[in-house]
Amino acid sequence: MHGFFIVETIMDGLVTKLAKDLRSVFEENFDYFDESGVPFFGMFPENCCQGASVFLGMLLSHFFTRDIIKVVHGSTRNRLYHHFWVEVDSKIYDLTLDQFYKNMGDKYTGIEYPAYGEDKHPLRQYFFFKEKMSAVLAFSIFVQKHANLEEILPAYQFICRELEVMGWKIPSPE
């Protein structure tokens, strides 16, 4: 039992570290992503939850079994508003959660910062309907409906290089 807890704690720590480092890459380079044609990154963290979640999900799939990584598409009850985040082994990682603080901070708590390893999403009642999908499916949908593969692949390679500067060794795809 103790061994499982230690492994789970190490995994949570690695996922959180990667998520925080990726958030840092986005914050420091949002102009690059915007100019490169990655949709919606010009005002990071606003309106770029899908891309941020797709990138995080794909990066995590290099390190962990893919069945524990889910990109979640949440929507309001009337399906007018949407948001994306990542779940890893049922823990919540939302790199753009803080985009809601300005407009919803008086109604919801825990949204002034990104979510790293939370048990429950702070906006779970607002984004009531949730569709979970693999990181690969989320990537495919993102590229087919919102972005171009020719722009996303160089951006992904840029992210990998930036993360390597931070000490990450991103495995090459097999």
Image (spheres, rainbow, N blue to C red):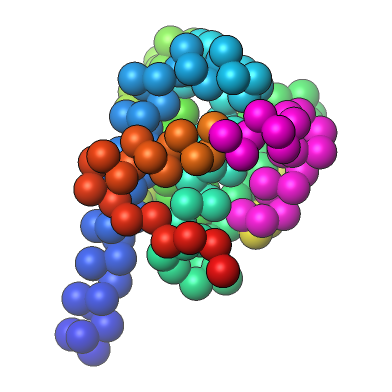
In what quadrant of the picture does the C terminus appear?
bottom right
Q: Is residue 152 visible?
A: yes
Q: Is residue 77 visible?
A: no
Asked if residue 153 is among those painted magenta in the image, a careful observer would answer yes
In the displayed structure image, the side of residue 103 where residue 4 appears, left or right = left
Q: Position of residue 93 (x, y in %)?
A: 42, 45
User: Who's the residue at 57% across and 34% down the image?
Assistant: 154
Q: Position of residue 57 (x, y in %)?
A: 53, 51
Q: Position of residue 118 (x, y in %)?
A: 36, 49
Residues shaded magenta: 135-154
In what quadrant of the picture does the N terminus appear?
bottom left
User: Who's the residue at 57% across and 25% down the image?
Assistant: 48
Magenta region, main secondary structure: helix
Residue in the foreground of this view, choosing between 23 and 131: 23
- Residue that extends furthest to the bottom in the rendered view of this protein: 1
In the displayed structure image, the side of residue 100 where residue 40 appears, left or right = right
Residue in the foreground of this view, choosing between 77 and 144: 144
35 versus 88 height, above or below: above
29 versus 52 height, above or below: above
What count of labels does the image hold?
Answer: 0
User: Who's the residue at 81% across and 38% down the image?
Assistant: 144
Q: Position of residue 109 (x, y in %)?
A: 36, 29
Asked if residue 104 is among those painted magenta in the image, a careful observer would answer no
Residue in the foreground of this view, choosing between 9 and 120: 9
38 versus 61 height, above or below: above
144 versus 111 height, above or below: below
